[in-house]
Image (tube, coloured by chain):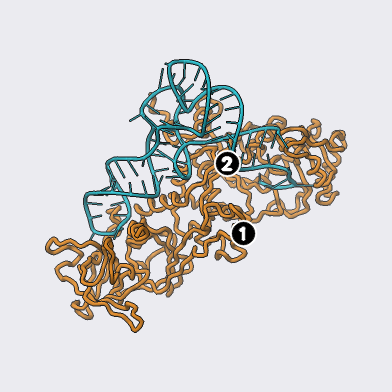
Amino acid sequence: MSEENGAAEEGLRDFIRDIVRTDLREGRVQSIVTRFPPEPNGYLHLGHVKAICIDFGIAEEFGGRCNLRMDDTNPTKEEHEYIDSIQEDVRWLGFEWAGDVRFASDYFETLYAWAEHLIREGKAYVDDQSADEIRVNRGTLTEPGTNSPHRDRSADENLDLFRRMRAGEFPNGARVLRAKIDMASGNINLRDPVLYRILHATHPRTRDAWCIYPTYDYTHGQSDAIEEVTHSLCTLEFEDHRPLYDWFIENLPVPSRPRQYEFSRLNVSNTIVSKRRLLQLVRDGHVSGWDDPRMPTIRGMRRRGFPPEALREFVKRVGVTKSENLIEAGYLEHFVRDVLNKKAERRMAVLNPLKVVITNYPEGQTEELPAVNNPEDETAGTRIVPFSREIYIERNDFMENPPKKFFRLSQGREVRLRYAYFVTCQEVVKDENGEIVELRCSYDPESRGGNSPDGRKVKATLHWVSAAHAIDAEVRLYEPLFSTPVPGADGDYLKDINPESLTVLSGCKLEPALVNAEPGEGVQFERQGYFCKDKDSTGDHAVFNRTVALKDTWAKVQAKA
RNA sequence: UGGGGCGUGGCCAAGCGGUUAAGGCACCGGUUUUUGGUACCGGCAUUCGGAGGUUCGAAUCCUCCCGCCCCAGCCA
């Protein structure tokens, strides 16, 4: 066995990578070229993440290249804002395209010349029918279509008409250029598809140079051919378009012969990815914007604190197949935790504070206790955490009448304060309503650092923050945007919106080391989850997002009880 | 009633005529633990949408049936 075939011979296996390996081995291609071809009409989202990882990932793995091409053939929908955000998002995910960003609009002139070529060959014609007539005459899924009355115009007449279309002589919708293929085909894409439509609109890049624009079908394969793409990878719904894709490649003097392969889309439970619906969420104020941390957009996930490696690993592990799927949202969270567990430094933060006074601790004294930054990474070092007489602990770490399995603090019970001391609860202070407002505890001076002085055990270790040193913060907790696996599966998807997808906590207490937190840098609030500073933070108002909670077996035990 | 796809445990997914039907997530037990986290160990499909057939042998080959998805934009 040769070991020299490199990583590509090992590595991931799926039907597309198998094809690539074979093509390379058998010399059908010298090196592979892929492309990621978004239409710049919206922000990239989870659905795109799969395509990006496949397009860029495969090129990378096999030593090929991947182009980033804006599929900008419809000037009525596309904007510069999206062209910029797409590049930013692809880079954030960790990929880089070969050379400059490409634009389908860069090929308009070539595409036009090829259209004239088809006309001369008698393979395309100008149709004067209205959109409605074309639709009616296309037939149905079960009945063949009927030929256009203009289908047999002479090449000269077609050429003249097509040139006049380009010259702007006709209004929108007056005529289209169609391929002459087969109006009776079982594949509706082959029933004389539209190649060009008249659109008197300003294009973000070509401005007013054109008033006819090529359709997706007429543009995509040829753009691939121009860029010498070898493997044009796309989702399943384009499977039916492949015969048409191939038809153009065969009938045009293209410089290369790309091949299209289709894989299944990524569907994740309890979320949506439809542009129209995402837009509605933003417009109707169900979320704060395209980068709301609950949004499945790349910007939203970035702000939420999802590391790009987690997204890449997720896609890798989901795999590439042709089967429809609905991935549980929890699977993605697993990879987020997995990455963050190794990377994120630990901090202590109390989300729902309960004051604790250490009655036998000297008033006015502060100790600086060392704490490990990341037990999973020795190189992360340690930091100092201040301890004093008054601290905060988590409200739900204390129970007055603890059930059997509750290990945490209760009256008369001793627990460890992480990196600090063993403390025992002596007294519960309540207000006039019976609400617990304060705990009075004693500490064991011998247990400094949290070490057991005499080998005695304690069943719980709590996180805490010194009251005098705490930073006040707002913390935002997120749950899935939708409460059903497939939003809208039975009716209106808006009815499936989870009303509790956002919980805002204020008055949270953070340990001082958190002042230095940077947005986008994940930290673990010990025992709680992974968090990151939000861009809404200001100099005197810290805001943190919970990226994902830690696994919580106590919550499960409780739920069962 | 047309064309194109897909059906392996709750969710993904290997498997390509001879394996005890990989692996991950989830779930259930247990060990370690100054995070009820992590890590580690163990459990979790006599069965591959169904029925026939071929074969010494089938998830893998053949036939029929069933279910699900996509297509009737001058969107991509």
Q: Amino acid at mark 1?
A: Leu
Q: Nearer the viewer, residue A475 or A212?
A: A475
Q: Which mark is residue A203?
A: none
| Left or right: A181 as drawn, with respect to A266 | right
User: What distance separates the C-alpha of mark 1 from that of mark 2?
Assistant: 26 Å
Q: Position of residue A49 (x, y in %)?
A: 52, 48
Q: Please tell me which residue is depicted at 46% across the width and 69% down the height of the picture.
A: A504
Please tell me how crowded label 1 is: few (under 14), some (14-19), or many (20+) other residues with Cα within 10 Å.
Answer: some
Using the rendered view, name the quadrant where residue A444 is placed: bottom left
Q: Position of residue A145 (x, y in %)?
A: 79, 36
Residue assigned mark 1: A279
Q: Nearer the viewer, residue A474 or A202?
A: A474
Q: Which mark is residue A35?
A: 2
| Image mark 1: chain | A
Q: Which chain is cyan?
A: B
Q: Quadrant of the N terminus of chain A?
A: top left
Q: Is residue B14 above or below residue A432?
A: above
Judged from the image, the secondary structure of the residue bearing numbered disc 1 is helix
Q: Is residue A359 visible?
A: yes
* Front disc: 1 or 2: 1
Using the rendered view, name the quadrant where residue A278 is placed: bottom right
Q: Please tell me which residue is depicted at 33% across the width and 69% down the height of the picture.
A: A394
Q: Which chain is orange?
A: A
Q: Nearer the viewer, residue A10 or A285?
A: A285
Q: Amino acid at mark 2?
A: Arg
